[in-house]
Image (cartoon, rainbow, N blue to C red):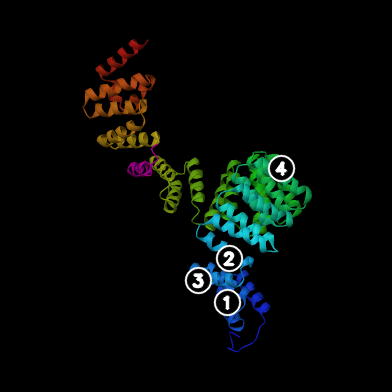
Amino acid sequence: MLKTNSIYFFDLVEFEEIIIHYLDAGKHSLAKKAVKLGLEQHPHSIDLKLLQVELYVFEDELDKANFLLNRIEKIDPYNEEVFIQRAAILSKTGKHKQAIINLEKALIYTDDNVDVWSLLGMEYLYLDDYLNARSYFEKCLFEDDEDYSALYNIIYCYDMERESELAITFLNKYIDKNPYCEVAWHQLGRQYFMLEMYKEALTAFDYAILIDESFIGGYLEKAKTLEELKRYQEAIDHYLVTLELDDPTAFAFVRIGECYEKLLKFDAAISYYKKAVHEDPLLDRGWILLTNIYYIQENYQKASYYISKAIKIDENNPMYWRKYAEIQLKLNLFEEAVHGFENCLELEDDDIEIYIGLADVLLFLGEFNDAVLVLTKAKKIYKNFAEIEYRLAGLYFVLNKPILSNRQLINGLKIDFEYHNILKELFPPMLETPKIKKLISDFKKATE
């Protein structure tokens, strides 16, 4: 009809089937055209008008949907779809409790309780009421033990309540009735994994794979479990199976690489990390793993190249900037190291190691006043830390501020006397000064 502009008559049921087919296929523009044509031929059809409401709700035209629903309700006040669609509108506007009231009304008039139970379960999920949500999904599963959507939602509720033991009890009862359900075995394995019961998890994943040899989720979870049991080569073998069953994923390549790295097979690890970033160039985890492995191998040039890749993807990650600074220090690129440490502080990574690292680099560059400023900021957070006091003592010594230097030195000696040897490493002339030698000697005698 649409292609030829010809007029053909379809009965009401045919229009409904056509519209529902398009809705299920996600072809909403065609569904709209079918509704329009249907209403032209059957202008008084309540069912077609309700499908019109459904389309309005999908397109967020909620005022139109409400207006049409009110008209339908006056004609057919006991139609369950009126309450279901009104619940959908209320749900979209965040009024989940009112949506639940309408769905409960729909239950009075409907012959298809399962769909309404499922909708009620979802509304309770939006309210984080996992107990009620679970009860409705359990009703769905009781009616149809192959309703895997309901099964997943039940386990999701247990997960959110952190009730793995209860989830295991539930799944074991379900498996007793449905022993060949790979989804249930897979979910059971996940619960055991979360409880660190890896041998039990492995058994569950084995059953899932035995039931369905092409079940990718089973192989992935079994591989992760084998990793926890330090059976890395077996884990690799299972990850490789997933690559055969479906298109390769960066996730699988990364996990294989990590297994090889734990086996100290660094070349193989690098190969798979490179496959991961080739598959997904925006996977910063792949770049950072390459960075770390080259850093371990003391190939700092390559480590620097790969950390830059990670930073381009996520420049607000302070851990990346910390690694960047460490690498630049190894390459004797001190100004770049300063840049890395300063970015860490800007991103609120105020670990004492960052302050100390930055201060030491500034000291090396001769930026003594800047180093003092950094350590003074650190002292506001980390009170009574010898690492800070001795460095400030040395910097004030270099800046020819003997009173401040002596005060910081005494502070340091009080906190940790032995640590004063750091002065020999950072400020050797200071320890050769007779006054300083005497101060340290006198302090030692006084505390003995």
Distance (Cα) linking label 4 and label 1: 47 Å
Asked whether the beta carbons under mark 2 and mark 4 sit within 8 Å of each other, the answer is no
Provide the major secondary structure of the magenta segment.
helix
Q: Earlier in the sequence, mark 3 or mark 1?
A: 1
Q: Amino acid at mark 3?
A: Lys
Vertical comparison of 295 with 20: above or below: above
Q: Which secondary structure lies at badge 1?
A: helix
Q: Which amino acid type corresponds to the residue marked 2 in the rendered image? A: Gln
Depth check, front residue: 20 or 320: 20
Q: Amino acid at mark 1?
A: Leu
Q: Gap in Å between the C-alphas at discs 3 and 2?
A: 12 Å
Q: Earlier in the sequence, mark 4 or mark 1?
A: 1
**Residue at the disc numbered 2:** 85
The mark nearer the N terminus, 3 or 4, is 3
State the separation of the CA atoms marked 3 and 4. 47 Å
Task: State yes or no: residue 436 in magenta.
Answer: no
Q: Earlier in the sequence, mark 3 or mark 2?
A: 3
Using residue 409 as the reference point, say whether residue 147 is left or right of it: right
Tell me if I can see residue 407 in this picture: yes
Helix, strand or loop at mark 4: helix
125 up-or-down from 365: above or below: below
Residue closer to the observer: 6 or 98 = 98
Task: Judge the density around disc 3: few (<14), some (14-19), many (≥20) Cα neighbours within 10 Å.
Answer: few
What amino acid type should be assigned to the residue bearing mark 4?
Thr
Q: Is residue 9 left or right of residue 300?
A: right
Where residue 269 sits: x, y (%)? 57, 47
Q: CA distance from mark 3 to mark 1?
A: 19 Å
Numbered badge on residue 30: 1
User: Circle 3 sits on which residue?
Assistant: 64
Q: Secondary structure at mark 3?
A: helix
